[in-house]
Amino acid sequence: MLSLEQVEAGHVVRIVRLAGSQSFVERMKELGLVYDTVVEVVRRSPLGRTIQLRYGTSHIALRLSRNHMIGVEPLHQQIASVQPERALDYVV
């Protein structure tokens, strides 16, 4: 199992674990990041502190300090075209 911070841009993964404080886990659930959700890592910030995700019709950015609490498994797919110019729905 990988943590979300280890996944490169353009790769698709499935969430298999959420760990951390109760408030962190609840916030991720509110955003729809629950067990078995498939997400695409769209891009990373230039300084590497945040990561942009796409899942369903949503785009969010998470601080990498929190991403180690999200366990994922790769789906062995890579997205050929990434659209980083799209606006984010949420920044957490």
Image (spheres, grey):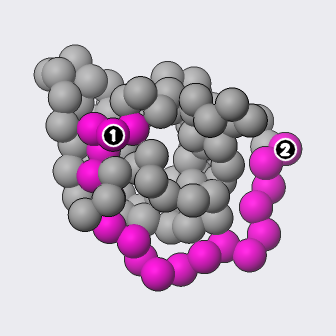
| Residue type of the residue flagged with mark 2 | Glu
Label 1 CA crowd tier, 10 Å (few <14, some 14–19, many 20+): some
Residue drawn at x 76%, y 61% is 82
Q: Whole-percent x and y of residue 7? A: 49, 58
Of badges 1 and 2, nearer the viewer stands 1
Residue drawn at x 15%, y 22% is 22
Q: Whole-percent x and y of residue 56? A: 53, 56
Residue 70 as seen in the image, left or right of residue 82 = left
Q: Whole-percent x and y of residue 91? A: 57, 24
Q: Whole-percent x and y of residue 31? A: 40, 34
Whether the residues at callouts 1 and 2 have beta carbons within 8 Å, the answer is no
Residue 15 shows up from this direction: no
Stretch in magenta: 67-85
Q: Secondary structure at mark 2?
A: loop
Task: Tell which of 36 and 75 is nearer to you.
Answer: 75
Residue drawn at x 37%, y 30% is 66
Label 2 CA crowd tier, 10 Å (few <14, some 14–19, many 20+): few
Q: Secondary structure at mark 1?
A: loop
| Residue type of the residue flagged with mark 1 | His
Find the residue positioned furthest to the top.
23
Q: Quadrant of residue 44?
A: top right
Distance from disc 1 to disc 2, alpha carbons, whole Å, reads: 26 Å
Task: Tell which of 5 and 17 is nearer to you.
Answer: 5
Going from N to C along the chain, the mark reached first, 1 or 2, is 1
Find the residue positioned furthest to the left.
22
Task: Tell which of 75 and 3 is nearer to you.
Answer: 3
Q: Which mark is residue 85?
A: 2
Q: Which mark is residue 30?
A: none
Is residue 68 found inside the magenta-colored segment of the image? yes
Residue drawn at x 63%, y 58% is 9
**On the image, numbered disc 1 is attached to which residue?**
68
Q: Quadrant of residue 19?
A: top left
